Amino acid sequence: MHKLCIIGSMKELGVESYTHHLEILKLLSKFCFNKTVLVGEEFYKLRNLFKSFKFYKSTQSYIKSMDNDLKSSNNIFIMGSRYYRLERVINNVK
């Protein structure tokens, strides 16, 4: 069973944003997702530290390339703050 995880950055974290996003990435690396996609500037800044994940600056940039991910996934987990409007990913599922 192919599992896809899509997580959006959280703008509301403020001054501790870098530390919290880094901790989230460390935690995600322990899970058994076939593919992990991170959306948002806060995660994008950490892209060089986690080469096994896919990083996108915006929801729109991910939507342009998400078709292959969706075709090969049986289970999709999506989570993020309202700022990045990840519901647009769901609306583009065909």
Image (cartoon, rainbow, N blue to C red):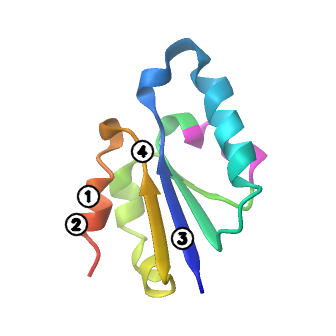
Read off the residue under disc 1: 88
The CA distance from mark 1 to mark 3 is 16 Å
Give the label on residue 91, or none. Answer: 2
Nearest the camera: 59 or 73? 73
Q: Position of residue 64 (x, y in %)?
A: 36, 67
Quarter of the picture containing the C terminus is bottom left
Residue stretch in magenta: 43-50
Figure label count: 4
Q: Are the residues flagged by discs 1 and 2 in contact, CB closer than 8 Å? A: yes
Q: Amino acid at mark 4?
A: Gly
Q: Residues within 10 Å of mark 4 (few under 14, many from 20)?
A: some
The CA distance from mark 4 to mark 2 is 15 Å
Label 3 or label 4, whichever comes before in sequence order: 3
Label 1 or label 4, whichever comes before in sequence order: 4
Q: Quadrant of residue 44?
A: top right
Kindly state the secondary structure of the residue where label 1 is placed: helix
Quarter of the picture containing the N terminus is bottom right
Q: Amino acid at mark 1?
A: Arg
Residue appearing at x 54%, y 34% in the figure: 42
Read off the residue under disc 4: 80
Q: Are the residues flagged by discs 1 and 4 in contact, CB closer than 8 Å? A: no
Q: Residues within 10 Å of mark 1 (few under 14, many from 20)?
A: few
